[in-house]
Image (spheres, helix red, strand yellow):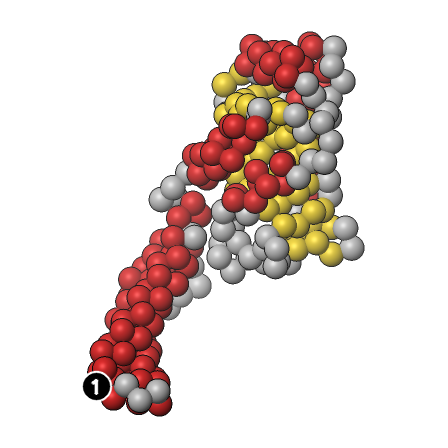
Amino acid sequence: MPGGSIYVQPDEKYTGSSPQWWYEKFWREDAANRRKSRYVKAAVGFVIGVALALRFGLSGAAPLFGVLLGGLVAAGDWFLDWRSFHATAVWRGARKGEVITGKLLRRSLGRLGYTVLDGRAIRGQASIDHLVIGPGGLWIIDNESWSPDTEIACYAGRLFFGEKYGTKTAKPLVEASEAFAELLSRETRIPVTITPLLAVHCGLLPKGGVVVAEGLTLLKPRLAAKVIKSADHVALNAEQIELLTRTAARELHRA
C-alpha cells in the first residue's frame, strides 16, 4: 500500500474496495449489535406492557400485554432496520432505479391519460430513463443514487451534493429536456417544453423529499407521479398526446 510500512501489515478493513462493499460488510458485522439492541428494546416494551396492564387493573393479562408490546417493539425495530438497508438497494447495485421509477409512474399515471416511454435517446446528444407525455405536459426523468449520508440541498440557487456543486448533474438533464422538446416540437409542429426531474433513490433529501435548483427538480421516486399530476392546467388534448407519443417512439432511439 503506498505510503505504508513494510513492518505493519495493512488492516484488511481499509484495503481498497468500493463504498458499497464496505457498507454491506459493516452492516453484516453489526448484525449482532442490532439484535442485542432489539432484545433490550423488546424487554423495555415487555415491562411497559406489564405496567400498563397493572395500571388498568388487568393483572391476570399482564404477561400477555407485556409479550404483545415487546413483540410489537421488536417487529417495529426490525422493520426500521430493514427499511434503512433496503433504501440503499439502488446505490448498492442490488436493484435498478429505472425499473422502480417506471413501475411507480405507470401505476399512478396510466389511468389518467399519460404515457411513459422508457430509455429514450437522441443519438449523439442525450439519453434519459423516462419520457412522460400527458394532459399536463411533458417530463423527462432520470434516476440516480448517492451514498446514504450525502446531503442534497439548494443554497442560494445552487445545487449541492454534500460539499460538492451539483451543476454537472443538473446541466446535462436541463439540456436534454431542451433537446427533446426541440425535436418533438419540430416533428409534430406542437410547441412543447419539457420539465426535467431526477429521481433520487439514495441520499439525504430535505423534509418533503424535493429539492429544486438550477432548473432541475430532485425528488424521491414515489413523488415523481405526484409532481406530474399536480400540473394545474390541461396543456395537451388526447390527439396531441397520441401524436407526440407516436413521434417520440419513432424519432427517439432506444437508450
Name the secondary structure under disc 1: helix
Residue 248 vs residue 133, the one in the foreground: 133
Residue 89 to residue 77: above or below: above
Residue 182 vs residue 229, the one in the foreground: 229
Residue 105 to residue 94: above or below: above
Q: Is residue 20 left or right of residue 196?
A: left
Residue appearing at x 51%, y 60% in the figure:
149
| Residue furthest front as drawn | 57
When asked about the image quadrant of residue 224, the answer is top right
Residue 206 vs residue 28, the one in the foreground: 206
Residue appearing at x 51%, y 28% in the figure:
110
Residue appearing at x 39%, y 63% in the figure:
80
Look at mark 1 in the image and give the residue it sits on.
60
When asked about the image quadrant of residue 26, the answer is bottom left
Residue 7 to residue 40: above or below: above
Specify the amino acid type for callout 1: Gly
Q: Is residue 20 left or right of residue 59?
A: right
Residue 241 vs residue 141, the one in the foreground: 241
**Image quadrant containing the N terminus:** bottom left
Q: Is residue 160 left or right of residue 252?
A: right
- Spot occupied by residue 188 in the image (x, y as percentages of width and height): 69, 10
- Spot occupied by residue 183 in the image (x, y as percentages of width and height): 68, 16
- Spot occupied by residue 59 in the image (x, y as percentages of width and height): 25, 88
Residue appearing at x 31%, y 85% in the figure:
53
Residue 109 to residue 17: above or below: above
Q: Residues within 10 Å of mark 1 (few under 14, many from 20)?
A: few
| Residue furthest right as drawn | 156
